[in-house]
Amino acid sequence: MIAPDQKQLVITHIDEAVRSGAREAAACEVATISSRSLRRWRKSLACGQSLEDRRKASAALRIPANRLSTEEVAAVLEVCNQPEYRSLPPSQIVPQLADQERYLASESTFYRILRLTDQQHHRGRAQKRQVVAAPKSWCATGPLRTWSWDITYLASAVRGEFYRLYLILDVYSRAIMGWEVHAEESAEHASELVRKACLKHGVHQSGLVLHSDNGSPMKGSTMLSTLQRLGVVPSFSRPSVSNDNPYSESLFRTLKYTPAYPSKPFDSLDAARQWVQTFVTWYNESHRHSALKFVTPMQRHRGEDVAILAERNRIYEAAKASRPERWTGETRNWNPVGDVWLNPPKNKTENAVEISTKAA
């Protein structure tokens, strides 16, 4: 049992650690108490009660009746380390022992003993499951800070063959910065597209982030050397996770579900390029994007959205003033969209890198 003054000291130290940025659960683990105990102690203090442990000493120190003896624990470890069992998890060991008319302990007890003796590791020849860290978070505070790119298929007239659309998107403005259609997929085509896009939009300073998935064209040596030469920072999604690159995926959906998308496959590479050119012009200059308060991507890219949304707000306020009985609350929110996050952290501050230097 912990003395009352020690409990108060533990609460004080944990509060100091939390104020310094530590997680409460981690601080409790260091103090060897549970978060539940900490909450109970704080509740007692808030109610003016003593922190004195009201349990009887004998009850607090009681040894569970079903606790395994030292010999029984040793028997479990001996079985787990035998040649025929050392590559198997307890979920396989326990049933096999039962077939031999032996019962040492439950599966959960096997796991607990292995964990306490630091033997609860990957067992067997199969490669250990990899824990992939979440992708780095980026905050775009203006255009030409963060780009996202990907490749999608366009059906050709030859069954089973597809053209590849390479497309670069500005995360802040959602404007298409560059595109090309090719018959094959390669890092050389991708690097050339990035080089042309940087040249077209005057990106000549280091700091631009280019995000993509983990495909071979994205991580090819030609592509990476081009990015290094241009001063572009590469960023990658987790393997087989499509929502780490949401802006490109969303754009491809817009492209393929627009009413103008051909109902039949493209007859030739030139036909595919002509249609994509028409789509890019429409998307950048005419399509009012729902995530941008229904201004076009290029209006947002050029900074024209502030004046456009301010004028919409003025019109709405004037309509409310002329007919107030038709309004039960505030007018529609036409405030401009602020910064845009790519793979934001939960609190939008931890593990995030803000792109604050304009890359143009």
Image (cartoon, helix red, strand yellow):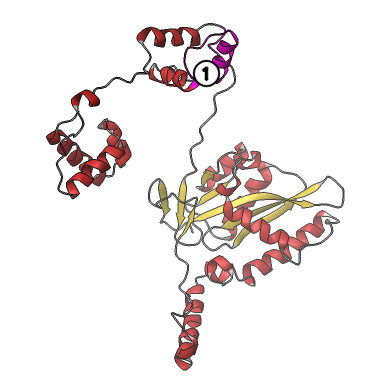
Residue 100 located within the stretch drawn in magenta: yes
Q: Is 257 or 330 nearer to us in this picture?
A: 330
Question: Which quadrant is home to the N terminus?
Answer: top left
Name the side, left or right, on which 349 lies relative to 154.
left
Q: Is residue 131 placed above or below 339 in the rendered structure? A: above
Q: Is 166 or 37 nearer to us in this picture?
A: 37
User: How far from the left and from the top, in percent, is residue 216?
Assistant: 65, 38
Q: Is 131 or 71 nearer to us in this picture?
A: 71
User: How far from the left and from the top, in percent, is residue 252?
Assistant: 67, 56
Tell me what residue is drawn at x 27 percent, y 33 percent: 33
Tell me what residue is drawn at x 59 percent, y 57 percent: 169
Tell me what residue is drawn at x 57 percent, y 55 percent: 198
Tell me what residue is drawn at x 53 percent, y 71 percent: 293
Tell me where the magenta segment starts and ends, as one range: 84-107
Residue tagged 1: 90
Residue 87 located within the stretch drawn in magenta: yes
User: How far from the left and from the top, in percent, is residue 290?
Assistant: 58, 68
Q: Is 351 or 64 nearer to us in this picture?
A: 64
Q: Is residue 346 placed above or below 27 in the rendered structure? A: below
Q: Is residue 115 placed above or below 262 in the rendered structure? A: above
User: How far from the left and from the top, in percent, is residue 147?
Assistant: 55, 54
Give the residue type at disc 1.
Pro
Tag count in the figure? Answer: 1
